[in-house]
Image (tube, grey):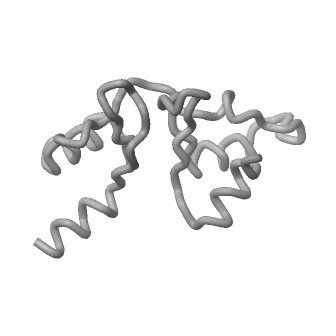
Amino acid sequence: MCPRPRLALTWTGLRHLVVVDGDGRVAGILTHERVAAAWLEPHSHRPMRVQDAVEAGGVFLVPSTSAREAARLMLDHGVHALPVVRDDGVLVGVLSWTDLVALLATG
């Protein structure tokens, strides 16, 4: 069983959790910003469901995406991380803005 999203974010120190369906295909991303915003909403005393807070969308990377193109997509869509998926939509990993900065720094 997967821990509650806000706990998973806290325990791991991650800022993004990729949500996948039963087949391992990406359904969206849950960000720490979305969780924080949900806490501030009226009626936040009700349990939050992941499906209500996940940022769904079709912006994904494939393993062959260049770092420059990935950075451009992040800027264009105002996101700090993007899932990397195979052609069949199955999650391979996550590329974050921090990863891109580290790549640039190590040259």
Residue 43 versus residue 33 in the image, above or below: above
Q: Position of residue 65 (x, y in %)?
A: 18, 41
Residue found at the very far left of the displayed protein: 107
Nearer the observer, 91 or 49: 91
The residue lying at 59 percent from left, 33 percent from top is 54
Image coordinates of residue 30 in percent, x first then y, are 57, 42
Q: Residue at x 83, y 40 (%)?
A: 44
In the image, 33: left or right of 35? left
- 91 left or right, relative to 60: right
Residue 101 position, x and y percent, is 24, 65
Q: Residue at the spot x=43%, y=39% of the render? A: 91
Screen quadrant of the C terminus: bottom left
Q: Identify whether 31 is placed above or below 62.
A: below
> Residue at point 52% right, 42% down?
18
Q: Seen from this angle, which residue lies furthest bottom?
A: 106
Q: Is residue 66 left or right of residue 20?
A: left
Q: Count of labels shown? A: 0
* Image quarter of residue 52: top right
Vertical side of 83 occupied by 10: above or below = below
Residue 21, horizontal then vertical, whole percent: 58, 28
